Amino acid sequence: MISRISSSGEPAGIPAVVPAGRMAGAGQPVLGLPGGTELRPWRADDADADALLAAGRDPAIRRWNLFSVADREEARQRIRRMHERWRSETGAVWAVAPPGRAAVGLIGLNDIDLAGGSAEVVYWVLPEARGGGLVGRAARRLSTWALDDLGLHRLRLCHSAANPASCRVAEKAGYAFEGVQRSALLHADGWHDQHLHARIAGDT
């Protein structure tokens, strides 16, 4: 049994939620969505690199994510870091991709804490993939995998209070609204209040 360490430095006797090595010891899965769209690992090819470039040039993505990519080589470096984060068990990032096509979006888990059983859901989609509920479906599918298959206990989804579209995503993905964190997110136009949503194991 893997135990937490108490403030005194002694094992606290509480089992870790997910043992270290659970992610690194397995390949990143492909997660299917209705209609054939997949959540799959990013590929360091021209098509996926160009999707990152397009995201870095999109005003909405830049506004809410402070995201930019200079060129294909930087995009490929980012993709390589995504795979490194899986192996180090600190993050898990998928491309949202229709069958046989390049990525039209990104969804993933940041700040993974396997022992603490928590992570934060992050996402964006390109303009052509917006408006049809794709992000909500992707967030629900990823959340189900993270809670039921990986074994995390709590997932959080945070966004600017000025971004109501993300509130709709959270609701569709089964995340309860828990409150407002004041001046918690820095965007290009300054500090924003942040909405906090969460989903825990056992939620539907």
Image (tube, grey):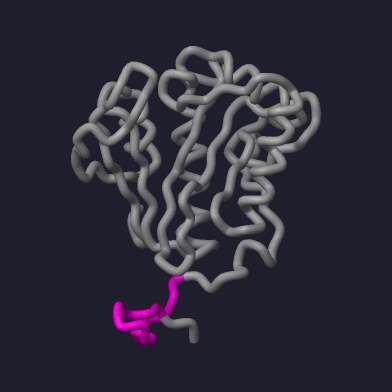
- Residue at image position (74%, 23%) is 72
**Relative to 175, does residue 46 appear above or below in the rendering?**
above
Report the front residue among 18 and 32.
18
- Residue at image position (60%, 68%) is 22
| Residue 138 placement, left or right of 172 | right
- Residue at image position (69%, 28%) is 75
Report the front residue among 131 and 197.
197
| Residue 202 placement, left or right of 79 | left
Q: How many marks?
A: 0
Magenta residue check for 117: no
**Relative to 120, does residue 153 appear above or below in the rendering?**
below
Q: Position of residue 80 (x, y in %)?
A: 71, 42
**Relative to 65, does residue 198 appear above or below in the rendering?**
below
Q: Position of residue 199 (x, y in %)?
A: 34, 51
Most distant residue in the front direction = 8
- Residue at image position (34%, 38%) is 158
Q: Quadrant of residue 14?
A: bottom left
Q: Position of residue 55 (x, y in %)?
A: 58, 21
| Residue 90 placement, left or right of 25 | left
Q: Quadrant of residue 127?
A: top right
Q: Position of residue 132 (x, y in %)?
A: 48, 22
| Residue 171 placement, left or right of 94 | left
Residues in magenta, as a range? 4-17
